Amino acid sequence: MKQILSWFQVIALTSTCYLALMLWFFPRIAVEHAGLDALWAVLGVTVIGVLTGWVLGLTTERFPNLTGAEIGKLVWGKWIGTVVEVLYIPIYIYFSALCIYFFVVVLNSFLPNTPLLVLMVTMCLVAARGAWLGVESLGRVASIVFPITFLGTIVIFLSLLFQAHRFWIPHTVTSWSNTIEGIYYLYPLYFGFTIARMLSPYYEHKKLRSIWYPIISAAAGGVAIIIVALAVILNLGWEGTRDISFSLPFAIQLVRLTNSPIERVGIVIIILTTAFTVLFVSNVTWALSSLGARIFNMPEDKHKWFICPIIILTIVVAASFRSEQQAFQFLDKYLVPLGWVEVFVIPLLQWITAVLRGLRTEPVPNQKRKPNGSKHTPKDRSIHPRQRYVR
């Protein structure tokens, strides 16, 4: 398989595959469940996010030439591995659809005369085109969209933070149970992180270096959400943040940059996040279509066959949400627990099982080859690096 992604493209692609689900309202979720410990909950979930990146990094470094579906089949066997990977498809379709729904609700406040369905279909069609072009094109776009969105978010919300009239930040935890509850409900911020497993074969794995790619991504995302949470809560207050469903768009309307040529900074944020969200949907669609191809042992270029049904199902599911309350209930009841299972528990169990069974797709460190040129000793359970799938 051709290795076509640079290290920066890997980080950018990974970074544009999470945060989209709760980007617009996560400060409200933090305050609602953690109360005065909301900022501690945000800090805690960023630590868990970095730990998630570390687990994914360990897994991808152990199987550098396999995608998620192939790792599952190798570690747990053909049937169990296939069942586990198949379950990712409907869950991530709902995840992508919910992200689209929340975003178009926010976007509709700026385009009130445009029906939600029109916005959904337009976004999905553009995203489908991106997924059709493949991971190389997505990597190039992500290397532009991610740094602009990241730096724009940091600059604008730092400006908002320093505009705040109140600078009181709790320096002690008032309730550990509330903090843990807040972390639990905030974790879907990282729901799309598992794309790291699908990207693994498309970049060069360098010793002691490539394992840091998902960790760097999680750390960068953590810095952004901490700054955003601080800016929103210190400007709106704890009660104000709790009472506004989409606190982020409301907060950015407060940004005032002195002597700035941009009159409405909020519009800039909307433009950046629109590009970010469309790219996110493209990434998820590509990952799901590639996963479908791997499950059926099809060549990598056959993932295009799965793009159309995945996009259609995503639009149908996104259009099925009738109200914000219904979408929030679905998030809390289903996607929060599924996020912990799909993003953290399964990759962790895969890595632990692979370690216990001695499975990997690279030579064991410091292993000497036999004089006759044989690549593996009889007791070696590793797999040749170029072998893409083992039954």
Image (cartoon, rainbow, N blue to C red):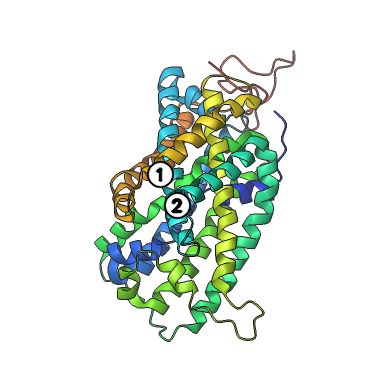
Secondary element at tag 1: helix
**Residue 57 badge:** none
The residue shown at (59%, 68%) is 268
Residue labelled with disc 2: 116
The amino acid type, in three-letter code, at marker 1 is Ala
Q: Position of residue 149 (x, y in %)?
A: 60, 61
* Image quadrant containing the N terminus: top right
Q: Which mark is residue 319?
A: 1
**Residue 134 lies in what quarter of the image?**
top right
What SS does tag 2 mark? Answer: helix
* Between 365 and 254, the one nearer to me in the picture: 254
Whole-percent x and y of residue 222? 50, 60
Q: Is 177 on the left or on the right of 249, as rendered?
A: left
Where 80 sits versus 270, above or below?
A: above
Q: Position of residue 111 (x, y in %)?
A: 50, 62
Name the residue type under label 2: Leu
Q: Residue furthest front?
A: 113
1 and 2 marks in contact (CB < 8 Å): yes
